[in-house]
Amino acid sequence: MTAAPLMVRMERVYAGFRRNPVFTDLSLDLRFGEHLALVGANGSGKSTLLSLLHGDLRPAQDLPERARPGKIYWYFAGVADSSPLTARAYARLVSPAQQRRLVRLGAPVTGLEIMLSGLDNALTLYGAAPDGRDARAAELAEAAGAADILSLRLTAMSRGKLRLCLILRALMGRPRLLLLDEPFDGLDAEARRAATRGLELAAGRCTLIASAHRNEDIPSFMREMLLVRNGRVTRRAAGAGAPVLPAGIFSQKRAAPPDLPEELHVPADGGTPLLRLEHVNVFIAGCKVLHDIRWTVFPGERWLLSGLNGSGKSTLLRLLNGDEQAALGSVTEWRGGKRPGLEELRRTVGYVSDRFQDLYAYDLSAEETVISGLRGSIGLYGEVLPAERERARFRLERMGVLHAADAPLSSLSTGNARRVMLARALAAAPSVLLLDEPCSGLDAEGRTLFFDNLRELARCGVTMICVSHHGDRTDLFTHELRLEKGRVQFAGPRSSQGKLAGAVRLGSSVTSTRSKA
């Protein structure tokens, strides 16, 4: 059979950040009509490769002696073109970095405006969209079962809603090359099915490359893989049937992390609730997101927050972390009294979320970022003490990123940056952990290390409240709170099979009996 026409050619490309190379001799050909799964460990270079293909990142110019930057050619018009503007005209990228830039921009744009910006591949919409494009956006959103996303403002979007919106934005541009960096992170099962249907339709008219850390995140029509490891990219067949990640690609052969210190044990607090919410309402951008929330949490309980994208889970966690305010008339109690001030709260509560990571714009090293968690500060101020440095490195080692201690957080891959933010949340030995999709961007090794830490902290009595759409290690959680359109539907202990047991449903309010386990 005649090979499909060439789409992209990379010749001996040298690429990296701040003279820290990711690739030093990368050569790769991509052809029209190929659909490839991009796999590899955290920090292996998957996001770098996608940025090179999209024209956002160019071969490095600040090179060691005798090294050459290499070349990238795009053949969208049938001839070799080395301009990244050509790549951006014909290709579209969905990535955590793109999401981060949009969140930091903080513009009060709607989902429709985000989708329309995909026409010109710009960060935001400039001027009016051509006639008929509003209708096309509405058609795409309707097909994805997300018609509400069109009028929803960025500031009120859940993480999953924003990720789905960015996928629809990419499809608006009718790309010849669609590049997806962990596209299904944060999507609930319904949204994943809708996004998959959209990608299956797009596959008939464009080439797709999607990175993934889980088998279920590889679309079934991708029959070939690009494996990124040790600065090299190799092709592998995905095999017959459902694609399966190659065994062992995420193992880094690191020494076993040190044991937790004994002093981390959190003493029990009798029968006093750790947290009590009564008639809690929250508004964001004039939109009511949480409705009459009533919920009680006792020390040592481990709650799983469930519900569809946009149901209010992330808003609830931000409220508990002090990043959102409840409306007048709401009651929020901590340990039987008023919620502590932000400084005290953030010294005793560990918090991880995509939005928090996106907005953490301080140019600190990984070690300094973890030390800021010890102090409960955003950013780092004052001299670093030896004991703080030792504790930060302990946590980085337990998350498998001690090798990146001195590297700027901004230079790390999304997955390794998430490991650092998890280390930051765990560093101060918090009595409460608020975890919003904590495994976002983590490879299999990272997830194993994280849950090893979490199990040990659970034995120490740490209270946990976690949002997850993947069902990772759900046996760890003792209770479940289910939200639907900002209202509590169920709450109560979970059985050993991971199902709700003993929950009492009272319309929009729920009374939960405390587990005797």
Image (cartoon, rainbow, N blue to C red):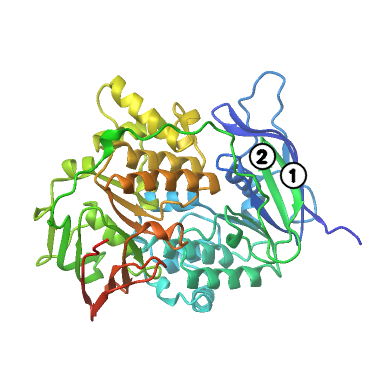
Q: Quadrant of residue 379?
A: top left
Circles 1 and 2: CB atoms closer than 8 Å: yes
Q: Which residue is mark 1?
A: 234
* Amino acid at the residue labelled 2: Arg
Which residue does the image show at 72% across and 20% down from the upper left?
A: 66
Left or right placement of residue 118 versus residue 486 in this view: right
| 258 lies above or below 327 | above
Which residue does the image show at 49% across and 47% down from the upper left?
A: 448
Crowding around mark 1 (Cα neighbors within 10 Å: few <14, some 14 to 19, many 20+) is few
Residue 371 image position (x, y, % from top left): 32, 31
Give the residue at the far front of this rendering: 517
Residue 131 image position (x, y, % from top left): 52, 75
* Amino acid at the residue labelled 1: Thr
Give the residue at the far bottom of this rendering: 507
Which secondary structure, mark 2?
A: strand
Q: Which residue is mark 2?
A: 229
In the foreground, 69 or 351 = 351
Left or right placement of residue 368 versus residue 198 in this view: left
Kindly tell me whether residue 384 is visible in this rendering.
no
Distance CA(mark 1)–CA(mark 2): 8 Å
| 231 lies above or below 3 | above
Residue 506 image position (x, y, % from top left): 21, 80
Q: Quadrant of the C terminus?
A: bottom left
| 143 lies above or below 127 | below
